[in-house]
């Protein structure tokens, strides 16, 4: 049967989930989780939460799904050790470096790849499995066909989000909140800019980035038949009444295979944004998927019942059997056994000779069955009672309480775990040579004669552009290495087209491919290419660098959410480049925002602009090779005047990233690079390199 995984942003939410039928909960502890605005758990609260859940047969998954810098990794290691000793059942992880720490410090605890890892293909799942990951939470944009294909071939468990908020951007690929306001979604501080109003071309009080909430309650049997292991309800920021309601309804749907109209209305009353959508799952990706939160009259009866479900004590959840012996030789003995085989015993007082009414099995069974206030219910009492004896009801009740209390302790006890220790990586001197120049373009016509005359060390061109403009390859000087850029998202159904294109450019002499997703590493290698790591891999620390080194990448790109000191601290086992110019990509969306505006596919016609309430403009362009959209920052990143300072960071290369520029503008930027032109604060930004993120 499907595992039902519910959110627990607080102890009340945890009780709400457990008392309404969750098989597992996921929660945050400390600062390294993607919902830092939730109450989360601190100190002894984690231990208490795990004991509460384990006593009731519920697993606990700890979210460690943020990026961490080198200087934060010792604190991450402490969190892993604390959580392991508390008895958590799994770590949910985004950062490749944190994956390696989990395996080193707590090798017996399962690791789940967070949806923040942006895994959306079978090759991504296989790559995660090779890292020692036991379960993958798939990207929420996948259709039922894509999920089914992955499940049929996956070497590890698959988890799917079935209810709750949709991010507009692929999880792990959203940088909008961080670039605009320093609140990074990859660091657990997302300010939800997708819920704000925007207009096309000029500001309008519309919400083109606000999706309705996901709801797949009608498809649970189908997901189970596909081979999905766990279904997940989003909502660590939501109130416990929401958790109680959503968990109860999904529990009922899993058990019965159906959901009533009344239940659907209760889900809407608990929380929705003008209803729900199943658009990604069913493949009906259109404007009907969008909606906003509209304040309305609260369903007081629903919320009151939801509160009662977790405030009025334990609901009986776990079956137990009692075994009793009452005789003149041994006195009163009582044992209890649960479905997991745990047995707890206690000795009671010596029975007395009955003066009026002797103790019967029926009376003993009635007393032992009164398990209210505990998570247990009695299924059977087996008793051997010597005739003519009596035992006070208070003694029977005390024995029952004693064995059930001991059973609580046994079930809630943390299992012994083997712990490793945190070991810093050995020091490695940074390269001292001046960084080279690399350039990426979005279109073939942006490759100008001036650009080629500069002989950059590497020129990145989208794979689709190289296939359409093969003559470009012959124009690139021998001193410049030409690399194809893969789309950051490639579904399994899109593989054949991409592989055919890779074969085409391989035959034209190209040998390097820029990859922005875990699943693309083996895809590139399968056609004889050397993969280079792009910013989409979210490289944020030296242990992640070590992982990509072991994967044989020829170079990597530091996350543009890092500060300059953090980039300097990176242990550069691989040639490392950083972005120093260009419109930073803020979102990557499965929706074609250009089509959403016009009603027809017009991706090839150029870019459009989103304008926010402050008048800031955000260009929207087509992700080359697909109909997905990339939202770009309005201001251009500009560090061309900081080349002297950047030499101290130990970098292999500085990359200029051209997106919306025409050829004349490209040449102007190249001239600015050569002359280290001064910074223009009105139209440019230093990005996060100097400000950092929260």
Image (cartoon, grey):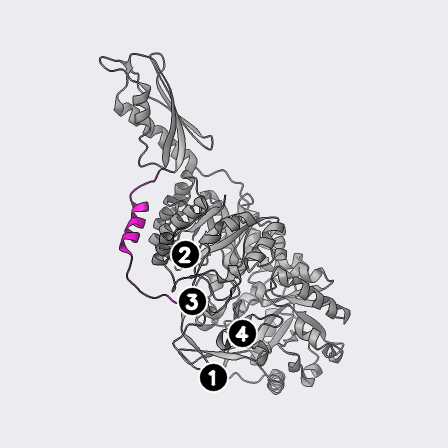
Cα distance in 3D space between marks 2 and 3: 14 Å
- State which tag comes first along the sequence, 2 or 3: 3
The residue wearing badge 3 is 192
Above or below, 541 against 687 in this view is above
**x, y percentage for residue 677?**
57, 85
The residue wearing badge 2 is 235
Which residues, given as a range, are shown in magenta? 290-316
Crowdedness of circle 2 by 10 Å Cα count: few (<14), some, many (20+)?
many
As for residue 87 lying within the magenta part, the answer is no
Cα distance in 3D space between marks 3 and 1: 25 Å
- Judge from the rendering whether residue 423 lies leftward or rightward of residue 555; answer left or right: left
Please name the residue shown 69% across and 64% down the image. Answer: 499
As for residue 292 lying within the magenta part, the answer is yes
- State which tag comes first along the sequence, 2 or 4: 2
Q: Nearer the viewer, mark 3 or mark 1?
A: 3
Does residue 678 show up?
Answer: yes
The residue wearing badge 4 is 584
Mark 2–mark 1 CB contact (< 8 Å) = no
Q: Label 4: state its secondary structure.
A: loop
Cα distance in 3D space between marks 1 and 4: 16 Å
Above or below, 549 against 197 in this view is above
Crowdedness of circle 4 by 10 Å Cα count: few (<14), some, many (20+)?
many
């Amino acid at each position: 049967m499907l595992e039902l995984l519910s959110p627990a942003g607080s102890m009340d939410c945890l009780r709400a989930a457990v008392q309404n039928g969750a098989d597992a909960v996921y929660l945050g502890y400390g600062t390294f989780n993607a919902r830092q605005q939730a109450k989360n758990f601190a100190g002894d609260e984690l231990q208490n939460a795990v004991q509460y859940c384990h006593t009731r047969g519920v697993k606990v998954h700890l979210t460690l799904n943020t990026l961490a810098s080198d200087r934060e990794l010792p604190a991450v290691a402490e969190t892993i050790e604390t959580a392991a000793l508390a008895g958590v059942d799994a770590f949910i992880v985004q950062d490749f470096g944190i994956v390696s720490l989990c395996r080193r410090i707590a090798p017996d605890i399962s690791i789940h790849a967070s949806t923040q890892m942006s895994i959306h293909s079978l090759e991504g799942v296989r790559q995660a499995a090779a890292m020692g990951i036991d379960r993958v939470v798939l990207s929420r944009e996948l259709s039922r066909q894509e999920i089914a294909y992955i499940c049929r071939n996956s070497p590890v468990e698959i988890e799917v989000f079935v209810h709750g908020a949709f991010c507009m951007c692929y999880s792990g690929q959203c940088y909008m909140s961080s670039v605009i306001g320093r609140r990074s979604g990859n660091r657990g501080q997302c300010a939800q800019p997708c819920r704000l109003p925007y207009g096309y071309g000029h500001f309008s009080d519309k919400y083109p980035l606000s999706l309705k909430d996901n709801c797949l309650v009608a498809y649970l049997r189908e997901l189970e038949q596909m081979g999905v292991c766990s279904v997940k309800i989003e909502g660590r920021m939501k109130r416990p009444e929401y958790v109680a309601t959503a968990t109860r309804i999904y529990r009922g749907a899993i058990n019965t295979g159906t959901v009533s109209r009344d239940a659907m209305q209760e889900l809407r009353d608990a929380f929705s944004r003008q209803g729900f959508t199943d658009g990604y799952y069913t493949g009906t990706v259109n404007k009907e998927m969008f909606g906003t939160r509209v304040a309305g009259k609260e369903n007081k009866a629903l919320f009151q019942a939801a509160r009662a479900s977790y405030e009025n004590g334990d609901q009986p959840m776990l079956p137990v059997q009692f075994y009793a012996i009452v005789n003149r030789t041994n006195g009163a003995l009582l044992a209890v056994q649960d479905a997991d085989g745990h047995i707890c015993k206690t000795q009671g007082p010596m029975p007395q000779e009955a003066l009026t009414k002797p103790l019967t099995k029926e009376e003993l069974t009635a007393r032992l069955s009164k398990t209210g206030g505990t998570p247990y219910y009695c299924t059977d009492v087996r008793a051997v009672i010597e005739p003519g004896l009596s035992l006070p009801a208070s003694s029977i009740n005390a024995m029952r309480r004693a064995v059930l209390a001991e059973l609580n302790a046994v079930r809630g006890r943390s299992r012994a775990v083997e712990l490793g220790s945190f070991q810093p990586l050995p020091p490695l001197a940074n390269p001292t040579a001046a960084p080279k120049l690399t350039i990426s373009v979005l279109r073939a016509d942006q490759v100008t004669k001036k650009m080629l005359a500069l002989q950059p060390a590497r020129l990145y061109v989208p794979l689709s552009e190289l296939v359409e403009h093969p003559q470009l390859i012959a124009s690139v000087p021998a001193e410049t290495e030409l690399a194809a850029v893969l789309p950051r998202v490639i579904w399994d159904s899109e593989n054949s087209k991409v592989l055919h294109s890779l074969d085409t450019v391989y035959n034209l002499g190209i040998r390097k491919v820029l990859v922005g997703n875990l699943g693309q590493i083996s895809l590139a290698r399968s056609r004889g290419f050397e993969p280079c790591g792009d910013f989409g891999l979210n490289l944020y620390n030296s242990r992640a660098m070590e992982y990509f080194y072991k994967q044989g990448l020829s170079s990597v790109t530091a996350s543009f959410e890092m500060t300059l000191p953090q980039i300097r601290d990176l242990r550069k086992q691989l040639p490392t480049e950083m972005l120093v110019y260009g419109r930073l990509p803020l979102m990557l969306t499965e929706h074609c925002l250009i089509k959403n505006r016009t009603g027809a596919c017009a991706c090839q016609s150029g870019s459009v602009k989103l304008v926010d309430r402050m008048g800031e403009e955000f260009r929207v362009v087509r992700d080359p090779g697909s109909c997905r959209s990339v939202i770009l920052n309005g201001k251009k990143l500009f560090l061309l005047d900081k080349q002297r300072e950047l030499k101290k960071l130990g970098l292999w290369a500085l990359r200029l990233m051209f997106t919306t520029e025409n050829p004349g503008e490209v040449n102007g930027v190249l001239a600015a690079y050569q002359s280290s032109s001064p910074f223009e604060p009105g139209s440019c930004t230093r990005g996060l390199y100097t400000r950092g993120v929260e």
